[in-house]
Amino acid sequence: MTTTKPRDRFDDFVETCDECGTDTPHQVEISILTENEASDNAEFSREPYRVTTCQWCGETTAIRMNNA
């Protein structure tokens, strides 16, 4: 019989959380967000953002990838 040890979660990254003031696990994803929905050509104002969510306090931060 083969046994395997449980793997660590690989979808969390340890980053500094400004709200917690310490290094905590974060969920990180890339999202396409519309910057100016009130515009006549809103479909052309979509940009990629790196969105991180602290797994301890829930603080969410979005950084525009073109400015990173």
Image (tube, rainbow, N blue to C red):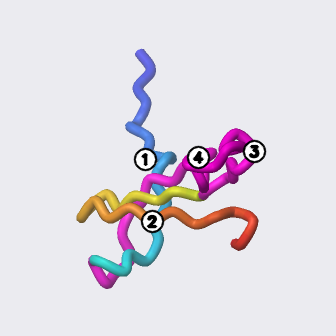
Number of the label disc, if any, that sits on residue 8:
1
| Residue identified by numbered label 2 | 61
Among numbered discs 1 and 4, the one appearing first in the sequence? 1
Find numbered disc 1 in the image and state the secondary structure of the residue it sits on.
Answer: loop
Which residue is at the front of the view, 2 or 44?
44
Within 10 angstroms of label 1, few (less than 14), some, or many (20 or more) residues?
Answer: few
Among numbered discs 1 and 2, the one appearing first in the sequence? 1
Asked whether disc 1 touches disc 4, contact meaning CB atoms under 8 Å apart, the reply is no
Indicate which label's residue lies in the foreground, 2 or 3: 3
Whole-percent x, y for residue 11 in the image: 49, 46
Residue type marked 1? Asp
Number of the label disc, if any, that sits on residue 44:
3
Residue type marked 3? Phe
Indicate which label's residue lies in the foreground, 1 or 2: 2
Q: Quadrant of the N terminus?
A: top left
What's drawn in magenta, residue-wise?
Answer: 20-49
